[in-house]
């Protein structure tokens, strides 16, 4: 006669990936998108990520493959973009980050930041010039908001755009700008003399005189990705370089929310990879004459990881459905980003302990994910920023100043 435990195992299977049957809430098309990206990560990323990370190399040859999968500007419509739903985009982010946060970051910077800025705020001429090429991976974009002294407080940015006749002249510094050294166009946010909504966005071709970028090295995180310092010295642009529909900080914040949304999903991909690798290792690794998966303390760790991944994935799906329905608010995105990245880091740390000393090597993924997630936790709003966004939403009292 089967025991209760035996029956449970027969129903769900040991270590099943979709323990809560979340797939039942996905359409066939959504599952198809996820499986295509999952297969790509399995075939192209997993065999190579250890080398890319160790050598601190972003594999530029993978960009056309991203484009072929429709991942660049995936959630945008028209201009050669795939026009996928928010949930489909989120599922793709989850699978990419299960491979590595740095590769999901490329898709996010290209699509959710640079392309999104042009799509939301650009003129028709700007959209036609850049978006089709960016969707094909033929042109790469970056997004210049953060500065050396203006991270969580972009209102204090010092980059300035002054008007000279019919031209704009930009000067300033940007820091932690993803992809800047390989980008063809930079979306740069700068202050102007305008009294109302002085922050404006500009499209800066990176071969423009006065624009320069250099990689930030060495790094202990995001090693298979590119982050840069950008210097703007009297960069002269025509009037047509300004994004006409972006006025004030609402412009860059709208793009940041697109990127933050992808992180809600992506962080759960990293967490899932940590859990699955720890589970597989625990079932194979023997100590005291038995697999370490048979010990209560190890099972507690695995169970806690599984619970948080299930909760975080359901949260991501709910937020995605809200985004597709047009009911999502910025504080909802803060809720998801704060919770899921925070939990993903804890899962990565706990998973690392299952491997013992072996866990500090690149032979296993948790410590790589852990290091990457420290960057994910910081960019697109720190824990403190998202905590205060939520605090302001529930009390009605802003606490930033």
Image (cartoon, rainbow, N blue to C red):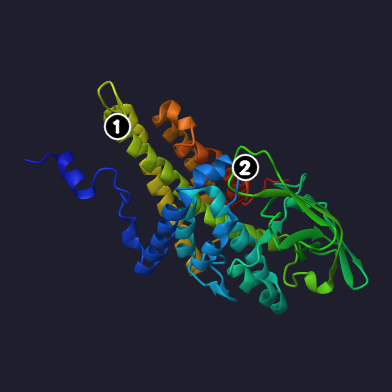
List the single residue furthest toward the top. Answer: 288
Closer to the camera in the image, 13 or 357: 357
Residue 72 as seen in the image, left or right of residue 212: left
| Quadrant of the drawing holding the N terminus | top left
Tell me what residue is drawn at x 67 percent, y 71 percent. Answer: 130
Q: Which mark is residue 308?
A: none
325, above or below 331, in the image: below
Residue 241 seen in the figure: yes
Residue 271 as seen in the image, left or right of residue 17: right
Residue 38 as seen in the image, left or right of residue 286: right
Q: Earlier in the sequence, mark 2 or mark 1?
A: 1
Classify mark 1: helix, strand or loop: helix
Please provide percent x and percent y for residue 104: 54, 54
The residue that label 2 is drawn on is: 384
Classify mark 2: helix, strand or loop: helix
Residue 331 seen in the figure: no
Please provide percent x and percent y for residue 221: 59, 40
Residue 299 as seen in the image, left or right of residue 326: left
Please provide percent x and percent y for residue 122: 70, 72
Tell me what residue is drawn at x 18 percent, y 39 percent. Answer: 5
Q: Residues within 10 Å of mark 2 (few under 14, many from 20)?
A: few
């Amino acid at each position: 006669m089967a025991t209760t435990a035996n029956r449970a195992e027969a129903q769900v299977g040991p270590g099943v990936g979709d323990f809560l049957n979340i797939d039942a809430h996905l359409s066939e098309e959504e599952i198809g998108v996820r499986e295509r990206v999952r297969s790509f990560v399995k075939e192209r990323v997993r065999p190579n990520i250890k080398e890319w990370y160790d050598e601190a190399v972003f594999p530029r040859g993978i960009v056309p493959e991203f484009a072929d999968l429709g991942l660049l500007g995936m959630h945008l419509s028209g201009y050669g973009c795939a026009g996928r739903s928010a949930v489909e985009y989120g599922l793709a982010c989850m699978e990419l980050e299960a491979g590595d946060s740095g590769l999901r970051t490329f898709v996010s910077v290209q699509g959710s930041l640079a392309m999104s800025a042009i799509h939301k705020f650009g003129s028709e001429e700007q959209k036609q010039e850049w978006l089709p090429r960016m969707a094909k991976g033929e042109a790469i974009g970056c997004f210049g908001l953060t500065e050396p002294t203006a991270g969580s407080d972009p209102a204090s940015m010092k980059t300035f755009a002054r008007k000279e006749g019919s031209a704009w002249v930009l000067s300033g510094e940007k820091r932690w700008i993803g992809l800047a050294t390989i980008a063809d166009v930079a979306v740069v946010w700068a202050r102007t003399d305008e009294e109302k909504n002085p922050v404006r966005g500009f499209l800066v071709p990176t071969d423009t005189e006065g624009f320069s970028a250099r990689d930030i090295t060495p790094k202990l995180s995001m090693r298979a990705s590119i982050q840069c310092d950008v210097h703007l010295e009297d960069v002269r642009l025509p009037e047509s370089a300004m994004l006409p529909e972006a006025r004030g900080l609402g412009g860059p914040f709208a793009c940041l929310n697109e990127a933050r949304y992808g992180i809600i999903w992506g962080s759960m991909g990293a967490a899932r990879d940590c859990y699955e690798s720890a589970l597989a290792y625990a079932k194979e690794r023997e100590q005291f004459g038995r697999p370490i998966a048979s010990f209560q303390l190890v099972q507690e760790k695995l169970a806690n990881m599984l619970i948080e991944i299930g909760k975080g994935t359901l949260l991501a799906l709910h937020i995605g459905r809200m985004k597709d329905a047009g009911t999502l608010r910025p504080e909802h995105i803060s809720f998801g980003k704060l919770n899921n990245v925070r939990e993903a880091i804890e899962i990565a740390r706990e998973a690392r302990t299952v491997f013992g000393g072996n866990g500090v090597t690149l032979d296993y993924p948790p410590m790589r994910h852990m290091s990457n997630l420290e960057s994910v936790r910081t960019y697109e709003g720190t824990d403190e920023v998202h905590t205060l966004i939520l605090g302001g939403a529930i009390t009605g009292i802003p606490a930033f100043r």
